[in-house]
Amino acid sequence: MRKYDAVIFDLDGVICTTDEYHYLAWKELADSLALPFDRQYNNRLRGVSRIESLNLILALGERQYSDEEKQAMAQKKNDTYRRLLERMSPADVSDDVLSTLKALKEKYPLAIGSSSRNTKFILSRIDLLDFFDVIVDGNDISASKPDPEVFLKAAAALGRKPSLCLVVEDAAAGIEAAGKGGFDSAGIGDASRLEGATYHIEKLSDLLGIL
Ligand code: BG6
Ligand code: MG
């Protein structure tokens, strides 16, 4: 008997390498504020909403900013990020990712559970907007990972219990969210070393040995 009924994927850093573009856009902003932001610190922002990410970056300095100033900074970062996303195409999905998604789609309903408000734009750039059965993103939730809301909404839309859905994540916040919501998880990339993950995978096609 199979263990899972559905699969819920994070987007940034799992399906495509937009996590790198997030880093570059935040790095530009952090440099302009002379804040010591680097790739290691960037790992803390994975899965975390735009404004919470900004707060984590600003915590690297002493200065306090008004809500208006923070909104303007978040907007500036998103403008930089969107310019990077404009360059994306279906070629930005690796063969390993695409062949795995296609193989899994034969057997399971598939969902995206992402904190990003740019999710649908990204999926349309890489030509996967119509591929997933369910998409829940940053526009649909009030609490971002590590809160489980995004995954719980995806499971509800799939009509499956959390315990029967496998979550695939590259973020510590996402693995924590999965656990809190009652989901098993597969950690990939930065999350492949996290103790909280049920499975540790190196590449997406490793899922085919689990599912
Ligand atoms: C997540 C990313 O998927 O989306 C985070 O891992 C990002 O780094 C968050 O901050 C929000 O993204 P966006 O596109 O709404 O700024
Ligand atoms: Mg991610």
Image (spheres, grey):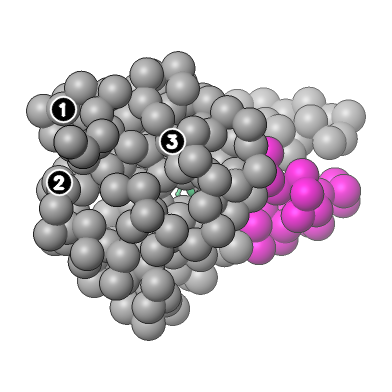
Residue type for callout 2: Pro
- Is 82 above or below relative to 26? below
Q: Secondary structure at mark 2?
A: loop
Q: Residue at x 24, y 71 (%)?
A: 127
Which residue lies under the disc numbered 1? Answer: 160
Q: Position of residue 80 (x, y in %)?
A: 55, 63
Q: Secondary structure at mark 3?
A: strand
Residue type for callout 3: Ser
Q: Secondary structure at mark 1?
A: loop
Q: Residue furthest front?
A: 1
Which residue lies under the disc numbered 2? Answer: 109
Identify the mark at residue 185; answer none if there is no mark: 3
- Does the image show residue 117? no
Looking at the image, which is closer to me, 196 or 130?
Answer: 196
Pointers 2 and 3 in contact (C-beta within 8 Å): no
Looking at the image, which is closer to me, 108 or 129?
Answer: 108
Quarter-of-image position of residue 39: bottom right
- The stretch of residues the image draws in magenta is 22-44
Q: Earlier in the sequence, mark 2 or mark 1?
A: 2
- Is 196 above or below relative to 194? above
- Dot 1 crowding, Cα within 10 Å, few <14, some 14–19, many 20+: some
User: CA separation, marks 2 and 3?
Assistant: 16 Å
